[in-house]
Image (cartoon, rainbow, N blue to C red):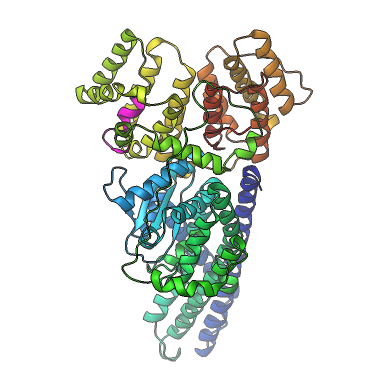
Amino acid sequence: MDFFQQQARARGQSRRMIVLFVLAVITIVAAIDLVAVIALRAGSGAHGQAPVPPWPIIAGTSITVLAVIALASLYRIVSLASGGAAVARSLGATFISPDTASPQYRRLRNVIEEIAIASGVPVPQIFVLDQEPGINAFAAGYSPSDAAITVTRGAMEKLSRDQLQGVIAHEFSHVLNGDMRLNIRLMGLLFGILVLAVIGREIMYFSPRGDSKRDGGGGGIFFVALAVMAFGYIGVFFGRLIKASVSRSREYLADASAVQFTRQTEGIAGALKKAAGLEAGTRLQTVHGEEVAHMLFGDGVGLSGAFATHPPIVDRIRKLDPQFDPAQLQQQAQLWNDPNYLAEDEHPGAMSNFAAAGGNAIAPGTITAQVANPKEDDYRTAMALHRAMPADWLAAARDETRAGDVVLALLIDTAADLRAQQLQTIEAEFGVPRRAGVEALLARIDALHRVQRLPMAALALPALRRRTRNELTRFMRCLWALVMADGEVQIFEYCLARLVRDQITEALSPVLGGQVGTRQLQDSRDAVVTLLSILAEHGDSDAEQTQRAFAVGIAQIFPGAGIAYTPPADWNTALNSALNQLDQLAPAGKQRLIEGIVLLLSADDRITLVEAELLRVVCGALHCPLPPLLQS
């Protein structure tokens, strides 16, 4: 199942989740109405009063119950509006600073950064559950730009680097396939049902339990409260079934994706074996574990049968290692459960030089199959890119006070007069220290390979996104001033500016990002023509070849339409507008659009590095992330 099918599946699961939730709420409301009518009629009959008409009771009870569920769910949804970090912090997780000095934290950050580069997605925020000895992890957020990955202390201490890679690759599968948004919405919806159980329990505790003849009907209130609590827990029952239905099938897929990504069955399988052999297992000790059970790497609360959010861990291991015998764990489990045991930190040998050397052609191929679907070569390329980055640039990218310097330095021109003008712009906006920081990086910019520059900017964005809204607004104003210093926009400048803008925008408003679109290609015809015209214009300097490439791309998307090549005058403004509209396409439409773009760019039998960068940024704007190495 490819990325576009996964997006369609996620949308289908969202609809099913809402239908099941509505059915659960209707069942609970009807049951509570019935109990309320019986209890109040019994109470009025015991006092010799006329029977109470049922419809006012039903209406009042229904409205009250629905209001409680709706308000509780709305409250939880609003509390999670700040995105993945809010979920992590709600469990008491500790944020890991990009410039952390802890060796364990640095190892975790390096693994996550390498996988983010290989996946073509922003580097997530990183959190650790320091009080959790079990092996577990989860990814949360509304979109890749908002993602937060949280791991337990047990995962950091007990897993080798390869095993930790496997777990993180598993979580990145959820990031890439749109599972996170579904998970966080599920948390908000189900909170309303859980609140009913809590309210019923509190009312029952404080209400009279005596004879209704002596307590003025208080006994009726007690039994209504008992019913609310009971049916609230029936709601929890339905909630667990809903979570299991949308979660369980995805875990096998995420395990398989981790193997495909790292080409290390031993990594993900080894992590699962340790989780099965450790006394702490994958359990979470926090009282909030059940709320996030459906998004965890392993079962965190001990649910089983129809309620299990994960397949049995032994079954997951056997899917990866058919020869696995659970008896094999007994000998190793004694070692793993030693309180002093720490996994050996494995450092793979030196990598060969990364592929796609600057300026060389990259052979075209089935690019859509790579979208959100990184393979072993992508991970190796990303690891090589990451490890070959200059140490001073990498340190600055991880420093919250200097991350902006990294992005600005990448835009500084080589021409002396233009460079002086750009540096003066930085000084006027931010002062002399910021200018000095940029100049210090420029002294070593030759050590940064061209193919490393966009990944370097991506590594700087997690620290940069932590600045205030006003600071980010000023930063974007300065960035655009550097781009326009010579009065025109170059391709690399556009790519970098769009990358930064998209990630900052989604970081500031997480709930608005990552939605699966429903728009049809035919309804976005003008935007498609604009996009392909611009790509054709910048893909080849020969006018005849440019028009031929445009025709090839259009024929793939709109067969037989006979659309003319019409590049806009202000191409960067037109491209921004077109990408914003095309991001609303349904998954199948995006797949066909990208196929047309690839045919257009490869019409001359090659995709250059500049074209590959533009393709990657276009795909990123469409929320279809591409790995750094385009496969032939």
Residue 586 sits in quarter: top right
Position of 497 with respect to 362 (left or right) is: left
Q: Is residue 22 visible?
A: no
Position of 142 with respect to 486 (left or right) is: right
- Going 48% across and 64% down the picture, which residue do you hit? 293
Residue 310 in the image, given as x and y percentages of width and height? 55, 65
Q: Is residue 544 visible?
A: yes
* The C terminus: image quadrant: top right
Helix, strand or loop for the magenta stretch, by majority: helix
Towards the viewer: 1 or 391? 391
Residue 191 in the image, given as x and y percentages of width and height? 47, 62
- Going 40% across and 31% down the picture, which residue do you hit? 457
Residue 43 in the image, given as x and y percentages of width and height? 51, 85
Q: Which residues are magenta?
A: 398-408
Towards the viewer: 326 or 233? 326
Looking at the image, is 565 positioned above or below residue 47?
above
- Going 56% across and 52% down the picture, which residue do you hit? 259
Looking at the image, is 228 positioned above or below residue 86?
below
Looking at the image, is 527 positioned above or below residue 112?
above
Position of 339 with respect to 541 (left or right) is: left
Residue 417 in the image, given as x and y percentages of width and height? 31, 8
Towards the viewer: 589 or 403? 403
- Count of picture labels: 0
Residue lying furthest right: 560
